[in-house]
Image (cartoon, rainbow, N blue to C red):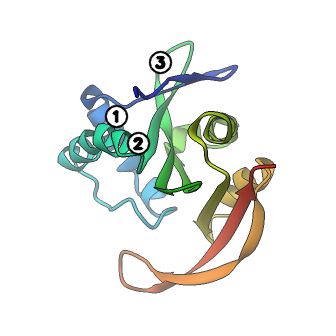
Amino acid sequence: MEQLPLETQRLSLRPYELVDASQVKRLAGDSRVSSSTLNIPHPYTLEMAQEWISTHGDEWQARAALIYAVTRKDTDQLLGTVSLVEINGGKAELGYWFGFPHWGNGYCSEAVAALIEFSFSMVGISALYAEHLADNPASGRVMRKNGMQPTGCIHKKNRAGVSTRIETYELKHR
């Protein structure tokens, strides 16, 4: 099954294309973005972006992940990413990152709402979980705004191998 595009009032969520790699490198390669996640390395190269994008089709076909490029409808400007990863039966991990110039505009919350709705209504997901670095409270606000409930705190090692506090959330389909 082909990955369906999604739309909100202001945004388009579409599959990534290799031509997006330079914009992914620019946005995700910003240290302010990578430092707010456990998963985005810094520096982030064009080759890393190309490799990451090249995996999306196979991951979707295997129903292991669903990754969307989030763009503005009026300009097609790439803003960031929303995704479901670790899809396993009816559960999946929700993830997202947005380029620093696009923080604080409500784009992330809007895109996450669309992905949650789609995951419950069309993908067969019954429970989502997510986590964020404790020192990134804005990410937690996106989760709470979209109905996710805090479930606790854990510690994971960051890219430097240092134990980092992580806040965890979940959302079950009603």
Label 2 environment density (alpha carbons within 10 Å; few <14, some 14–19, many ≥20): many
Q: Please tell me whether residue 33 is drawn above or below residue 61 in the rendered image.
A: below
Mark 3 and mark 1: Cα distance apart in space = 12 Å
Whether residue 114 sits left or right of residue 48 in the image: it is right
The circle drawn on residue 76 is 3
Q: Nearer the viewer, mark 3 or mark 2?
A: 3
From the viewer's side, name the closer residue of 151 and 87.
Answer: 87
Q: Earlier in the sequence, mark 3 or mark 1?
A: 1
Mark 3 and mark 2: Cα distance apart in space = 15 Å
> Which residue carries the number 2 mark?
27
Instruction: Answer whether residue 105 is visible to the viewer in this image.
Output: no
Q: Earlier in the sequence, mark 3 or mark 2?
A: 2
Residue 19 lies in what quarter of the image? top left
Q: Residue at x 49, y 81 (%)?
A: 156
> Which residue carries the number 1 mark?
23
Instruction: Answer whether residue 113 is visible to the viewer in this image.
Output: yes
Tag 2 and tag 1, C-beta contact below 8 Å: yes
